[in-house]
Image (spheres, rainbow, N blue to C red):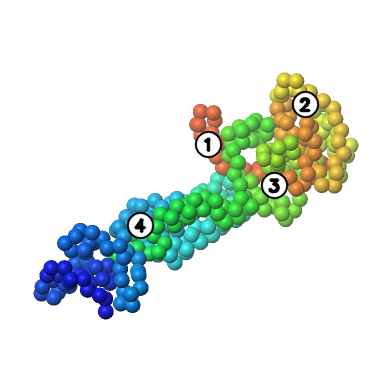
Amino acid sequence: MPAPLFSHSRVVWFSSRGYNTLGQEGKRGEQLMSIPGTGERPPAIWNTTGGKQPGLGRDRKPWLAALLSLYAPGVGQLYAGSFVRALLVYLAVELNLMAAALVVVIVPFPLLAMSILLLSRYGVLFLAAGHAALLARRAERPYVKRVYNSFFVYAPLVILAGLITPGLWVFKSLADVHRVPTPSMAPTILIYDRVITDRLVYRLRDPERGEIVVFRFPMDEEVLYIKRVIGLPGEAIKISGRAVFINGRRLTEDYARFYRAQAFPGSQPYDADMEAQLGQDQYFLMGDNRDDSADSRHFGSVAREKILGRVKGVFWSTDGAWRVRWDRLGIVFERPDTAGNR
């Protein structure tokens, strides 16, 4: 039986759910947030065995629980007093992002894939926030603090939420999105297009001629480039004027465009003749905008291991003034018919 504290004509009972009072009539009164006659919160609650239990805390605020959950899924549930639900929500959000990555890879239409991704991602986040707010609203009053209800628990979790994200890691290993900052692939890909990349496909097979790929720039691997596959491993490449020859046979390139003689001041003309012999794991990559593309004609061939994924299409596009280019939304990049170029 809990131990009583006598104060004037009232008896205050310490229990696991807070303080309860008995009036002179001996009826249970309302739970008190403070010791009668003092207005103070006691520092701790004592059970019958003398063990110290966590003290009373402030009532849980639904809006704060929702905000914490939005920033770091699961922390809002922890704040509301449920460790198990916090863990389940965290796992649900991470698994949702992993599943969304598979959707982006499987669904062939970029706009549809991104719509599913965004709806599922933010839908789960807002559901988790609403769940945290509901838990906080239903929490006992006065609230009995748990051992994890502390700033020194919340702060590291919020920081770790931005650093340890297995769902995001899986997503990045399967798919990615990129904003294109240059016109080197015009008119196929325009500046300010946002594209989806399938990073799974090249774990299953090698890149094929005509595919648009994302790769690490050989001179600075922190920088990612987007170009089209022109030459495959072991092939002999010859460029004569505006014509590209593979093993002596001219390559048909309906996608190539020529706008000016040279792109950068001091650089050689982009229609200068050249030859290259590719190694067994090397690819020759070029931009569709041949007169304004820094590609394998300048930095050489690209190793197979540096090619990260295949660009599937455009899911969003704006011009320099942030006006939406509606006609570009959902464009799918199909591999050109290269049967005659093999």
Q: Which residue is mark 1?
A: 326
Q: Residue at x 10, y 73 (%)?
A: 24
Determine which of the numbered discs, if any, sits on residue 270 in the image.
2
Instruction: Check disc 4 and report its element: helix, strand or loop.
Output: helix
Q: Considering only order in the chain, which callout, 3 or 2, is on the residue closer to the N terminus?
A: 2
Residue 58 percent location from the top left of the image: 30, 58
Determine which of the numbered discs, if any, sits on residue 308 in the image.
3
Q: Considering only order in the chain, which callout, 3 or 1, is on the residue closer to the N terminus?
A: 3
Q: Amino acid at mark 1?
A: Trp
Instruction: Check disc 1 and report its element: helix, strand or loop.
Output: helix
- Depth order, front residue of 212/63: 63
Q: Considering only order in the chain, which callout, 1 or 4, is on the residue closer to the N terminus?
A: 4
Q: Furthest-bottom residue in view? A: 1
Q: Amino acid at mark 2?
A: Tyr
Q: In the image, is residue 252 above or below residue 124?
A: above
Q: Amino acid at mark 3?
A: Leu
Q: Residue at x 55, y 54 (%)?
A: 164
- Spatial CA distance of label 2 from label 1 is 32 Å
- Spatial CA distance of label 1 from label 3 is 28 Å
Q: Amino acid at mark 4?
A: Ala
In this view, the mark in front (2 or 1): 2
Q: Considering only order in the chain, which callout, 2 or 4, is on the residue closer to the N terminus?
A: 4
Q: Do residues under tags 4 and 2 come within 8 Å of each other at their CB atoms?
A: no
In this view, the mark in front (4 or 1): 4
Q: Residue at x 55, y 40 (%)?
A: 316
Q: Is residue 262 visible?
A: yes
